[in-house]
Amino acid sequence: MEPVNRSEGATKTERYLAALCERTFLSLWSYPNLYTPEGRHGSNGSGKELCDLLVVFGNDIVIFSDKDIRFNSEIDVKVAWNRWRKRAIGESACQLFGAEKWIREHPSEIFLDAACTKPFPLLLANKPLRFHLIAVTTNTAIPAQRFFGGQSSGSLMLIPSLTDEQVSERPFVTHDIAPSKTFVHVLDELSLNVLFDELDTTYDLVRYLGAKEHAVRSGLLQSAPGEEDLLAYYILNGGLVLDAPFNLSPQLTSQYGSISLFEGFWAEYLHSDERRLMRQANEVSYFWDAFIENFAGHIRAGTVALEADKPTATHEQAVRLLAAEGRFSRRFLARLFLEKMAEVPPDRRSSRVCPSPFNEGVCFILVLYPRDPGEDYGHYRQERIELLHAYALVAQHKFPNLKWIALIGTEPQTDQGRSEDLLAIEVRPLSEEESNLAKRVSSEDGILNDVTNIHRSDIMAPGLRPSNLRRVRTKVGRNSPCTCGSGKKWKRCCGAPSRDA
């Protein structure tokens, strides 16, 4: 397989965005500055830039457009706001919609380089895609703080129901840019950092973006004073572990039908016991991240040991099973793996089976296989790979209801260094001959006799279990004071029907 050589970003802001995304999405799924052959003339011509950064993770496609536009604080704030908004948000939205259209219509015509000679290594064709569009903006935090009298964090407000004309009259307020198209998340410099710091796995970030879009498009969310307050509300209402975190209680739904958030949720969460305890408990989970990045690094470098003749997309699919786990799940899986590695003597073979807590039908198997003293490492590695295939066969026999099995082979405790092999198997019905072989291998070699049953509640941080989860109170309803600070009721201000309606 060929190495995957990515761009690192052409500008300072693009490089920063690329580094931020690589930390969250990890290197195998995050690609700055991709190109299309659109408009390219001749062998020496350059393609057209698709977007500033593209994340491809299975069926989820996250497209970023990054505009570093100066905000002119020396002129009237409304004039400055609309000039900035047109370039920073409007032009980003155009690029995002164009990139989405190209990927849908030409999924095989995306390249890593401007000369369009290095094809994008991951598969985009022949599968349903979910798009998440993000416009990254800068330079409004200080002007916004000044505009709101120093009482604001400086992040952009979100009032989805406003028209473009209404937003033009309300500096530092965003809306649903194009309700008939894919929703565009507008993230300023403050909210971008907060979001990627709190939701630092693909699973967690994509779930949040989807939940937010649903809350906006369903009419459930009236307004949010900033992305950070919306995120805090989401987390404090169990968004990291529970479904529908933006839903109101039945009583509130029947009375109001929607919610309007006020500033303060982020400050409350930032200093809460929930956040402190989660941060402490998450430390162990970064062992899982290191596992993922180790495999991803070998794929990017073209140095995989197992099935090296297979294309990048095949190896990516295997590693993606590990990366599809969220932070809570990684915490639990990492602890189980580390405990097993610590308890097994250096001369013993052992294994641990760990079903995914959140991704139904996925199971991880850690296989610890010792190397004989003086044994050639290449010979040992080949034996270990054959052992992984034996475990995969037995696992398919014992767990026929699974969809995918990921097997990780490594050494027990050793001072001679360590390597890892990863094998991903899509579970299929076994033939009678294969089933008999699996039974014999399991009986004779004692394979898969240490199965751990995982319950969802076991991985939740204290304070975030369904039994004692606190629902955050919000001010709701059309008769609430408008969040823009006008002093009017919501229904008489930002919640009023537009003049074009």
Image: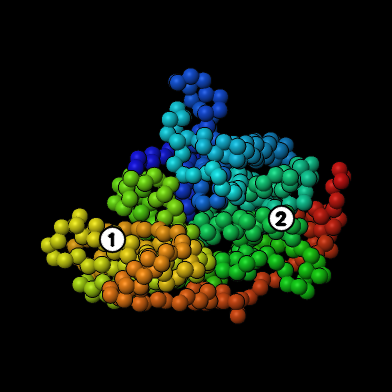
Q: Is residue 163 left or right of residue 263?
A: right
Which residue does the image show at 66% across and 71% down from the upper left?
472
Tell which of 235 and 349 is nearer to you.
349
Question: Can you say whether 146 is above or below 12 in the image?
Answer: below
The dot on residue 386 is: 1
Which residue bears the numbered disc 2?
Answer: 216
Extreme residue toward the bottom, this view: 467
How many marks are shown on the rendered structure? 2
**How was the colour assigned to the protein in this rendering?**
rainbow
Indicate the quadrant where residue 271 lies: bottom right
Which comes sooner in the sequence, label 2 or label 1? 2
Extreme residue toward the left, this view: 374
Extreme residue toward the front, this view: 432
Tell which of 82 and 62 is nearer to you.
62
Few, some or many residues within 10 Å of mark 1 (<14, 14–19, 20+): few
Which residue does the image show at 15% across and 57% down from the upper left?
376
Q: Is residue 157 left or right of residue 420?
A: right
Tell which of 289 and 143 is nearer to you.
289
> Label 1 amino acid?
Glu
Residue 51 position, x and y percent, is 55, 38
Indicate the quadrant where residue 439 lies: bottom left
The quadrant of the rendering that contains the N terminus is top left
**Can the viewer see residue 488 in this picture?**
no
In terms of secondary structure, where does tag 1 sit? helix
Mark 2 and mark 1 in contact? Answer it, CB < 8 Å.
no
The dot on residue 199 is: none
Residue 138 position, x and y percent, is 58, 43
> Label 2 amino acid?
Val
Residue 180 position, x and y percent, is 74, 45
Which residue does the image show at 87% across and 46% down from the upper left?
501
